[in-house]
Image: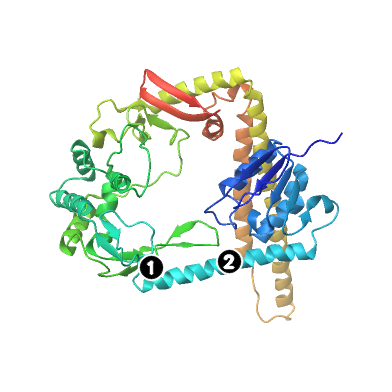
Amino acid sequence: MPKAPVFKAFSVTPIIFHCINLSVQLDDGFSGTNFNRPGVQSLLEDAKNEKFDCVVVKDFSRFGRNYIEVGSYLEQIFPFLGIRFISINDCYDSANYKRNALNLDINFKNLLYDLYSKDLSQKVKSSLCIKKENGQYISSIAPFGYEKSLDDRHMLIICEEEAEVVQKIFSLALQGATSYQIAKKFNLENIPTPIEFKIIKGKTFRKPKGDKFYWSSSVICSILCNPVYVGDIQYGKTEKNEVGGCNILKARTEWKIIRNHHAPIITKEDFEQVQKNRRKSYRREKKDKYRHPLVGKVICGCCKHNLRIKKEVNSYFTCDNRYVTGLNECVGRVNIIFLEQIVLSRLEKHLEEQNLIIENINRYKNNLKEKRDVLFQDIRQTKIEYNRLKQKHYENYQLYSLGKQSRFYPLHEEMTKKQKIIQELQEQIFEIDEQIRETELENFITSGNSVLMLEVLKQYIDTVVVYNEEDIRIKWKI
């Protein structure tokens, strides 16, 4: 008797029909051109774990609007995983296309969905740009200290209660108070935070990480540097390199500004003086590209905020929030090496209990080998391109030496670039080989390999709650 199908419905609007087992993935608010959206990633994860064998959508555009990606899933990924794909409105069932390429009409539909999405995105972008240039405030949320006018939702008016807090922040800054000192003062005086003002007005609902919301130095800094409080609006700070792509910050010289857009809360003289004082005390630190695998997972047991790393001879984790909350129970200092040893020791014990060490080694090795194979392919392709350049360089010289060409066009620069690319790829392969050697069973956890450590931490550890060096609790992922 054939196996009963397990369905996975995927749509902005759920599709309900009779079946053995049905789960629905929704991606409201995400562009269909982006295949990194949560619903798709969840679907792929379930597909790898063989939790379903059929995907049903209303039409192809509900699954995606990038015709290359959609075609890749229909012709390669889903057939490889043994998953049937059904599009109801398009009358498509992959069971009828097992040995044949997709029909021209299906490819054409996917291309139309892709072009429609890009055209719509461009029209919306142009419309928003025109509104901004005409002085309309188009953001859905008014900045702290303001609210949208009831008569014109594209205009900002002053919210007196919030404006008093903004004025107090600037007043303290003019007196020489730092952002940490202002935040601590507000927390001790129980002045509501911006999010609490919104909750009081019924505009949002959120729960704090700990027992209450706290002012932070970053919130104070964002208010102090925002020109909206002198009546100006800045826009055009970011742009997207492609439809559905990420926002990229543009150079400050390219930002656009509308002067005297709305009523100011702070005078321009006071605002400029604050900026001048902050520039004197501001020191840019060179960012380290390396991100410690515990960052984002280690939280303070008192206030439940993330711990930050202080880099010294003996680097340590600390709770910056203690400077602004006044809570003495917040974590002061926990040595990084000590915390790593505690976490790794408990992680090793957890994996042994779950009999997962060998599985993790094999999975990690396979991922490394796949990356290495891709690098080898890149090297082969680059060598082919290098040899073509070398041959063309020789032919140019032959034509020039025989008088058939008036000038000699050397290709040394292009050839050198290809050689440099090959060398960089070889170095990457060498690093991967080193990582593979470090994944022997006895070194799997204790090798100190930060890349491997990060891979395992992401998979099994949810949070590490630190109260002090004697009280460290780990919450495992289910």
Q: For the view shown, which residue lies furthest in the left direction?
A: 175
Judge by depth and name the residue closer to the eye, 206 or 336: 206
Estimate the x, y position of residue 228 in percent, counting from the top left: 27, 61
| Residue shown at 71% from the left, 47% from the top | 55
Q: Amino acid at mark 2?
A: Lys
Q: Quadrant of residue 120?
A: bottom right
Q: Secondary structure at mark 2?
A: helix
268 with respect to 198 (left or right): left
Figure check: 106 above or below 15: below
Q: Quadrant of residue 296?
A: top left
Figure check: 342 above or below 382: above
Per the image, the residue denoted by label 1 is: 254
Please tell me how crowded label 1 is: few (under 14), some (14-19), or many (20+) other residues with Cα within 10 Å.
Answer: few
Judge by depth and name the residue closer to the eye, 438 or 167: 167
| Residue shown at 63% from the left, 30% from the top | 437
* Comparing labels 2 and 1, the label whose residue is closer to the camera: 2
135 with respect to 339 (left or right): left
Q: Amino acid at mark 1?
A: Glu
Figure check: 100 above or below 300: below
Camera sees residue 185: yes
Judge by depth and name the residue closer to the eye, 440 or 73: 73
Per the image, the residue denoted by label 2 is: 118
Q: Secondary structure at mark 1?
A: helix
Q: For the view shown, which residue lies furthest in the front direction?
A: 18
Estimate the x, y position of residue 324 in percent, counting from the top left: 24, 37
Q: Earlier in the sequence, mark 2 or mark 1?
A: 2
180 with respect to 88 (left or right): left
Rounded to the nearest angstrom, the CA distance separating label 2 from label 1 is: 24 Å
Estimate the x, y position of residue 375 in percent, counting from the top left: 66, 47
Estimate the x, y position of residue 293 in percent, counting from the top left: 48, 34
